[in-house]
Image: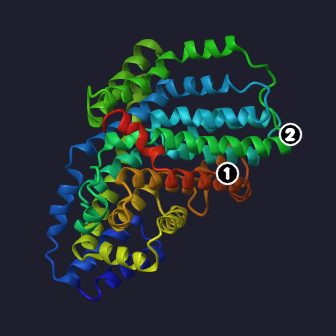
């Protein structure tokens, strides 16, 4: 490795971030500066651009984004939320618990934390406020649960992790010590996210119950009604079938995640136009516009982060970092604590997709050296970064919940802290018990 390439790469990146440059510009310029320092031909950037955005699995990204946008426009998301709301009843914390469950449902069709917070929050936050919940609590519960949108498959960050990790092979020394590691695929990541998502939701529900009991918050003014639940399920039948069709097709082997995204689009168009009759041409064009903007933004970050990561790998920076960490401790629990602590801090300041693309080449080799399964590592990574949606200063979910509730971000942030603690505790449980993430993929033959 060249003596000062790390200083040039990270120094340029840090300087540009301090100056307020967009993450894409900071990554790209830092990579270009390192290439000039190393004497590489900048034309390599074009070659890396093609390799980073030309992969077949990446086609799933804009397709799932479009499917999520169409589902919201077609009324599928509203009907899913209605099913969750029908379960609230008059119980302690019933409405806020229904909000958490609604985020769990919506995550199965959106794959995005902010989208989940916006869709669920528009319906549930006003409802909680009308039933006596404080504005800051209603907003904080929704912002915290919105992070489940990237844990429950199909998940956009899981697609990015799968693409980023596929090209990183374990060190031969790690294979010799711990045996052969399983390969990384997007299908495995999707399956592995179910139980960890349920564990994180369980932590939020427990914290919600304890806090609502102290505050005296209850559910809706109406009693729990089986008839109301049945009616909500009847009206939302086609919406509830969407994740079953998409994920069932993937897990049964009928189609790949990329093909599943296309199936999701056509399923939504059929339901929105012919069943619910709420989707028109204007809605389709709005969804296409939103997809183009978001997918283009993600692809630019992916391009710049791929070059950044390639320079790190070519100069053995991940190996040096792994050696440094293992020089401090070889205790698996201590290493998990270091990894989770670092990811929590990074999630507070950096967008999730950029963090995944930058950190996977650095941290996955460390995981291999201590025998951590890559699917398990990826699941913990995404769960940990999901907490960043509810923690300042970045905290995208906080801004969305603040806009809906009319409460200040500062007050919501303080109220959301216990939820962040509950999520972090759930993440440590997922990290320390690998079978939470690995059992279901093994049962299904992956």
Q: Secondary structure at mark 2?
A: loop
Residue under pointer 2:
216
- The vertical placement of 246 against 316, above or below, is above
Choose the circle earlier in sequence order: 2 or 1. Answer: 2
**Considering the image in quadrants, where does the N terminus appear?**
bottom left
Q: Residue at x 40, y 75 (%)?
A: 326
Q: Position of residue 324 (x, y in %)?
A: 39, 79
| Foreground residue among 248 and 283 | 248
- The vertical placement of 361 against 204, above or below, is below
Q: Residue at x 72, y 47 (%)?
A: 406
Q: Residue at x 35, y 32 (%)?
A: 444
Q: Position of residue 311 (x, y in %)?
A: 25, 72
Badge 2 density bin: few <14, some 14–19, many ≥20, Cα 10 Å: few
Q: Position of residue 120 (x, y in %)?
A: 60, 35
Q: Secondary structure at mark 1?
A: helix
Q: Position of residue 408 (x, y in %)?
A: 72, 55
| Foreground residue among 179 and 419 | 179
Q: Residue furthest bottom?
A: 3
Residue under pointer 1:
419
| Residue 115 is at least partly visible in this image | no
- The vertical placement of 27 against 88, above or below, is below
Asked where in the image residue 303 lies, by quadrant, the reply is: bottom left
C-alpha distance separating marks 2 and 1? 18 Å
User: Is 397 positioned to the left or the right of 153 in the image?
Assistant: right
User: Is 100 positioned to the left or the right of 183 in the image?
Assistant: right
User: Is 36 positioned to the left or the right of 290 in the image?
Assistant: left
Badge 1 density bin: few <14, some 14–19, many ≥20, Cα 10 Å: many
């Amino acid at each position: 490795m060249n003596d000062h390439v790390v200083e040039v790469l990270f120094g340029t990146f840090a300087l540009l971030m301090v100056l307020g440059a967009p993450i894409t510009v900071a990554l790209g310029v830092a990579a270009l500066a390192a290439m000039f320092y190393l004497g590489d031909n900048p034309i390599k950037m074009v070659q890396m651009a093609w390799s980073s955005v030309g992969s077949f699995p990446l086609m799933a990204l804009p397709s799932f984004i479009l499917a999520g946008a169409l589902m919201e426009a077609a009324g599928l998301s509203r009907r899913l939320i209605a099913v969750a709301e029908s379960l609230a009843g008059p119980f302690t914390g019933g409405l806020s618990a229904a909000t958490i469950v609604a985020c769990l449902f919506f995550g199965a069709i959106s794959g995005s934390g902010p989208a989940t917070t916006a869709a669920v929050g528009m319906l549930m936050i006003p409802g909680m406020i009308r039933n006596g919940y404080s504005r800051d609590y209603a907003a904080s519960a929704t912002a915290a649960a919105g992070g489940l949108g990237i844990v429950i498959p199909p998940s956009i960050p899981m697609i990015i992790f799968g693409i980023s990790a596929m090209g990183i092979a374990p060190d031969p020394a790690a294979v010799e010590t711990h045996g052969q590691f399983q390969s990384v695929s997007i299908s495995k990541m999707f399956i592995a996210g179910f139980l960890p998502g349920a564990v994180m939701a369980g932590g939020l529900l427990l914290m919600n119950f304890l806090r609502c009991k102290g505050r005296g918050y209850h559910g809706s003014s109406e009693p729990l009604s089986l008839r109301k639940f049945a009616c909500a399920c009847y009206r939302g039948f086609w919406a509830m079938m969407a994740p079953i069709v998409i994920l069932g097709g993937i897990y049964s082997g009928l189609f790949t995640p990329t093909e599943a995204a296309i199936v999701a689009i056509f399923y939504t168009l059929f339901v929105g136009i012919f069943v619910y009759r709420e989707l028109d041409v204007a809605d389709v064009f709005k969804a296409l516009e939103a997809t183009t903007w978001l997918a283009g933004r993600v692809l630019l970050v992916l391009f710049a982060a791929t070059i950044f990561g390639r320079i790190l790998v070519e100069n053995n920076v991940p190996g040096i970092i792994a050696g440094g960490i293992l020089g401090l401790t070889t205790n698996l629990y201590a290493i998990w604590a270091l990894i989770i602590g670092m990811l929590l801090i990074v999630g507070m300041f950096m967008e999730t997709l950029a963090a995944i693309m930058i950190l996977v080449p650095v941290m996955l080799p460390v995981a291999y050296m201590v025998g951590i399964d890559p699917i398990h590592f990826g699941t913990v990574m995404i769960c940990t970064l999901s907490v960043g949606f509810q923690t300042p200063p970045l905290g995208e979910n906080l801004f969305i919940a603040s806009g809906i509730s009319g409460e200040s971000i500062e007050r919501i942030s303080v109220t959301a802290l216990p939820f962040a603690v509950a999520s972090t505790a759930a993440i440590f449980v997922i990290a320390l018990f690998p079978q939470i993430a690995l059992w279901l993929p093994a049962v299904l033959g992956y």
